[in-house]
Amino acid sequence: MSVVFWKELADHFSSRRFMILLILIVFSGLWAAYATGQAIRQNADTVPSQYVFLLLLTSSGETLFSLSTFLGFFGPLVGITLGFDSISGEYARGTLSRVLSQPIYRDSLINGKFFAGLTTVAVLWGSILLLVIGLGITLLGFPPNAEELWRMIIFTVVGIFYVGFWLALAMLFSLLFQKTVTAALASMAVWLFLSLFVTVISSGIAGLIIPDATTPEALSRRADVENVIGRISPSTLFNESVGILLNPAARVFGMALQSQAEGILPTPLALNQSLILIWPHITTIFGLVAVCFGISYIIFMRAEIRA
């Protein structure tokens, strides 16, 4: 498996397609972080000093999007780019049977391809985090504290699993269709549906279940129904996890009634309390990765491969 892993890793980092996408994501994300850092410097008197570095990831500043929002929306493109031709490309070139005729087992091949893609995602996400920290130290003049650093590291781990789901899904479509274009289009269609249209569908279903939302309690129930339905999308799970993890003051998902906030001190949550809130989301994302890759593994092990 190590031979396949290092070969695939070298192919990913030498691919022009991946390098173009890498440059686009890194420079766009850093521009968002730079604009936010400049806004923090100009409004230093009104910005809370305890979690300034987290604002580099969550605040939009003068841009249209924050860095976490940008990564949540365009991060799946990295996974799809790495996975949609991982198997179908081998079929199209006729190299799959030639590779498996060597002393390389099938499970070593698909495991090596998946872990090489996941390592590439980890390097990309970790590099963005390090660049943001370095940019923040340059702009603000001080390093992040320990809790900020831990929250950013956990954010990176969650992001790797999130993009890993799209990598596993693209590999699954690559096996099912065995055509590169079809696998790419199917992956993009699922990404657009789960990222954009699930919100519209959940809002419509919530309106049908609770049609008369005129009171605050009814509005809260409708928002809860929208959140539950929207969590079929990994994008929703990721956004809610990031919203709690990178905003220590956040305590609930969605809308909160004023009666629910009575008697609660407006203090930031500790890191372990934030993790308790988002732990179901993290385990669900990890489970989706395991299920998609497990199905791909079973299909590939049973597939008929001829020269």
Image (cartoon, rainbow, N blue to C red):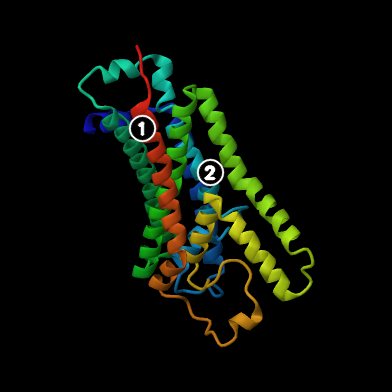
Gap between marks 2 and 1 measured at Cα? 19 Å
In-front residue for pair 87/61: 87
Determine whether 245 is above or below 97 in the image.
below
Reading the image, the residue beneath label 1 is 13
Crowding at dot 1, Cα within 10 Å, few <14 / some 14-19 / many 20+, comes out as few
In-front residue for pair 115/131: 115
Q: From the viewer's perspective, is 68 left or right of 164?
A: right
Q: Residue, x 57% and y 39% (percent of image)?
A: 190
Crowding at dot 2, Cα within 10 Å, few <14 / some 14-19 / many 20+, comes out as some
Which numbered dot is residue 74? 2
Give how far across and how far down residue 83 sits, in percent: 43, 33
* Amino acid at circle 1: Phe
Return the disc, 2 or 1, that comes first in the chain's sequence: 1
Residue 50 is at least partly visible in this image: yes
Q: Residue, x 50% and y 42% (percent of image)?
A: 76
Label 2 secondary element: helix
Label 1 secondary element: helix
* Amino acid at circle 2: Phe
Q: Residue, x 40% and y 71% (percent of image)?
A: 271
Q: From the viewer's perspective, is 209 left or right of 115?
A: right
- Location of residue 151 (image quadrant): bottom left
Q: Residue furthest left?
A: 103
Q: From the viewer's perspective, is 174 left or right of 130?
A: right
Q: Residue, x 41% and y 37% (percent of image)?
A: 295
